[in-house]
């Protein structure tokens, strides 16, 4: 299950479409996420870029087995399982992005993401609205019509750490494909 999710991530992160992950890919992802921050306060945008840079450094240090400065799919899958999802890296490399996203997208400052904010965010990140609408429904665990910061962090954690296909967070960027 995790490998299926990590394969989906690899495809998403491969911004150059060349079947390899590079520093340029992670900078592009950082810029893509940072572009979601429409406020004048660039702290969230900077935090997202910094988190993607940290993620890249973890991948490079622990996953670039041949030292070529690029991460292949097998290297990515191995390093995601062994290092990125380990407690010492997960917060800095993954949850930091979730926290910065919440700050950037919660324009009302009420601590939650509305349905429209959530769907817009994922649409701008390339996730089809039909998937983000379904994910929103699943992630809104308390049925309040919004996703709290805690619900969002829980979803991110489930996506990366859970082997349960039915866990709401497993649907974060769309349905898990058997051939992913």
Image (cartoon, helix red, strand yellow):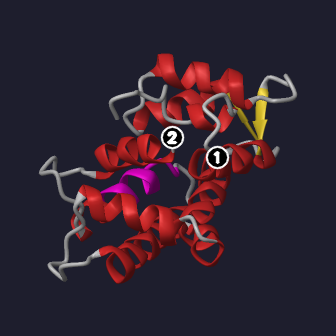
Q: Which residue in the protein does label 1 denote?
A: 162
Q: Who is closer to the viewer here, 108 or 122?
A: 122
Q: Position of residue 120 (x, y in %)?
A: 51, 30
Q: CA distance from mark 1 to mark 2?
A: 8 Å
Q: Are marks 1 and 2 in contact (CB under 8 Å)?
A: yes
Q: Residues within 10 Å of mark 1 (few under 14, many from 20)?
A: some
Q: Which mark is residue 127?
A: none
Q: Residue at x 24, y 61 (%)?
A: 21
Q: Is residue 43 above or below residue 137?
A: below
Q: Position of residue 149 (x, y in %)?
A: 77, 48
Residue span colored magenta: 28-37
Q: Quadrant of residue 53?
A: bottom left
Q: Residue furthest top?
A: 130
Q: Quick one: SS at disc 2?
A: loop
Q: Residue at x 55, y 27 (%)?
A: 119
Q: Quadrant of residue 28?
A: bottom left
Q: Residue at x 51, y 40 (%)?
A: 1
Q: Quick one: SS at disc 1?
A: loop
Q: Is residue 40 above or below residue 86?
A: above
Name the side, left or right, on which 14 lies relative to 96. left
Q: Residues within 10 Å of mark 2 (few under 14, many from 20)?
A: some
Q: Residue at x 37, y 58 (%)?
A: 77
Predominant secondary structure in magenta? helix
Is 98 magenta? The answer is no
Mark before the other along the chain sequence, 1 or 2: 2
Name the side, left or right, on which 107 lies relative to 83. right
Q: Which residue in the protein does label 2 denote?
A: 1
Q: Position of residue 37 (x, y in %)?
A: 52, 52
Counting every numbered tag in the picture gives: 2
């Amino acid at each position: 299950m995790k490998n299926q999710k990590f394969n989906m991530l690899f495809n998403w992160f491969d911004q150059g479409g060349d079947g390899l992950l590079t520093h340029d890919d992670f900078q592009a992802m950082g810029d893509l996420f940072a572009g979601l921050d429409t406020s004048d306060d660039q702290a969230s945008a900077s935090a997202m870029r910094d988190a993607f840079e940290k993620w890249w450094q973890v991948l490079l240090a622990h996953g670039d087995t041949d030292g070529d400065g690029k991460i292949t799919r097998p290297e990515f899958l191995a390093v995601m399982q062994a290092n990125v999802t380990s407690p010492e890296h997960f917060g800095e490399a993954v949850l930091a992005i979730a926290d910065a996203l919440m700050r950037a997208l919660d324009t009302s400052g009420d601590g939650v993401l509305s349905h429209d904010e959530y769907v817009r965010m994922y649409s701008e990140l390339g996730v089809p609205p039909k998937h983000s609408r379904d994910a929103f429904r699943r992630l809104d665990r308390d049925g309040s019509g919004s996703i709290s910061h805690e619900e969002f962090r829980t979803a991110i954690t489930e996506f990366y750490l859970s082997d349960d296909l039915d866990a709401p967070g497993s649907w974060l960027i769309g349905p898990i494909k058997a051939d992913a």
